[in-house]
Image (tube, grey):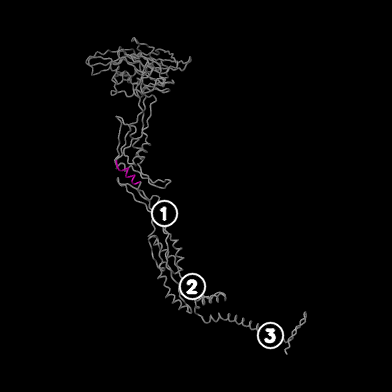
Amino acid sequence: MYNYPTRPSAGFAEPPSAGGSPAMTFIGQALAALFGGVAFFFLLLLLLPFGYGLVYAGRIYPGVSVGGIDLSGKRLAEASAILAQRLDYPERGRIVFQEGANVWSARPSELGMFLDYPNSAQAAYTWGRTGRLADRVSAQWQAWTEGTDLPPVFIFDERTAQSYLQGIAAQVDKAIIEASLSVNGIEVVVNSGQVGRTLDVAAAMVNLRVMMPTLTDGIVPLIVHETPPMIFDATEQANLARTILSAPLTLTIPDAEEGDPGPWTFDQATLAGMLTIERVNTPEGARYQVGLKTDGLRTFLEGVAPSFERTPVNARFIFNDETDQLEAIQPSVIGRALDIETTIQAINEKIVTGEHTVAVDMEYTNPPAPDDATAESLGVVELVSSYTSYFYGSSAARIQNITVSSARFHGVMVPPGATFSMADVLGDVSLDTGYAEALIIFGDRTIQGVGGGVCQVSTTLFRTAFFGGYPVAERYAHAYRVSYYELTRSGSVDTDMAGLDATVFAPVVDFKFINDRSSWLLMETYVDEAARTLTWKFYSTDDGRTVEWDTSGLENIVEPPDPLYEFNPELPDGKIKQVDWAADGADVTVTRRVMKDGQVYFTDQFFTHYLPWQAKYQYGEGADVPTPEPTDEP
């Protein structure tokens, strides 16, 4: 019969016996065995590295390789020798540098790469032998189970690589060269520009530093920076220069008239000397500008400009007293002047297009009184002053000079406010301009000279202005009283006219008056040779002015010196000829009052000092010369 242990009553526990049950004993023994095994296992783990290290003392752990070469169990010297034998990448490898279609191949050794075999072997031996115990065991375990391939230790001398790349740069690099344009004789020489190229050595070195540790062949793309020149192609400007030099340049005057100068021609050699090639900057970039030198053109044009410049000249008119209208008797002249700057611009613009005949640019100026001017538009509507002088007894030569000189003023127009100069209109007085030799006052005597009689004209003009109430700006009297200028219609001498003469000897001695009216002034001159009269007329608009005048008469009269007799070998024997006539010296003051609107408009005075004038005679051989009576000593 088995005795089964009874179940204790609920709620009460039966304490174990002192000896324990068999089950409990078994559990204790099992736990003791488990703890003992674990302790033994860790003891083995602690002892295993030491044992593993003892087994491979002085040798590389299994599974360790360098650059793919297994060095398991090898000693340092043996491992270094194996690496030196089998790792030949510095000499066997190839690094290819590529730039476009150009390639350069180099051994790594040429680029400064060398393997350090002893240190590479040392790195393999060190694997699993450094660091904490756990790190060492892990490294040894990794090498044992998976294998560990270490990169070889190498030396990279970057200076060698840079030197090699600089050698490539010497082939790749190109300087920036601008296009050039020049002239040799009349030939145009053009050279194209060159794009600058620079190898980026620094970028190539960055790629090398990445590739070298891989111990593999590869291609290193080279970066080349290109810099174009400011002017790469000057072909267009060269063609312009060739166009300029393709033919002579001819300058002409537009609408040339007979007597105009020109044309002027510049041959190609001259044009080549005037050619200018300038480098200019534009918003689109730099370029060459081709043309002709403005200084040279300007100097030439300034030299020829006066030869065809023309001052505008008013038309000449007469006033038709029946129709009260103007009739043109001489056409006006349109003024012209060379516009030098515009001409230079036109030459440079046209010659580059192949146009080698260029008209100079002219500035035209219309005269203020053109051919179609009317009496109303100019205010020339009536006669405002007229004077007639007489020249009885004048020689044919003197009459000729009066006629020629007075004609210069017939139909002349004077603008409002202008000062009229008789010398300006009279012009050159010479035999070439139609004058003859007649008596003139020269120094202290009357002699034969070209233009004698012109003062008849100037005196007549002075009196026309004087009695017309026009201000006189400049007037010179004769050196002595001339009877011509005091003659009346009847032929008698009116001494009241003394002091109202005017002499002109252009350009030094002039007569001037002012047209102070608001209208133009037209002058007409008429010579009646048969009647020996010269009439001068002023036409304008009557503004109501009148003239009052008086004269002091002859004052401070001085008798002339005794006659002077001079020998003239050209006179016939016994001949005596009078060549100058005596005249009393005297002073005269003429006062004029110009009235307008019942008031004095202005007053002026004309003072004249006449010199006493000596009679002069010339005699020939054997003439009976009067002897002056003796006078008492003072």
Circle 2 residue: 150
Mark 2 vs mark 1, CA separation in Å = 45 Å
Mark 1 = which residue? Answer: 227
The CA span between labels 3 and 2 is 56 Å
Q: Earlier in the sequence, mark 2 or mark 1?
A: 2
Q: Give the range drawn in magenta.
A: 237-247
Please name which of the two marks, 3 or 2, marks the residue nearer to the observer. 3
Residue 564 seen: no
Horizontal side of residue 425 vs 41, given as left or right: left
Amino acid type at circle 3 is Thr
Write down the residue under mark 3: 25
Q: Residue at x 41, y 72 (%)?
A: 88
Q: Which secondary structure type mostly characterizes the magenta part of the structure? A: helix
Residue 151 pos. (x, y %): 47, 71
Q: What amino acid is at disc 2? A: Leu
Find numbered disc 1 in the image and state the secondary structure of the residue it sits on: strand
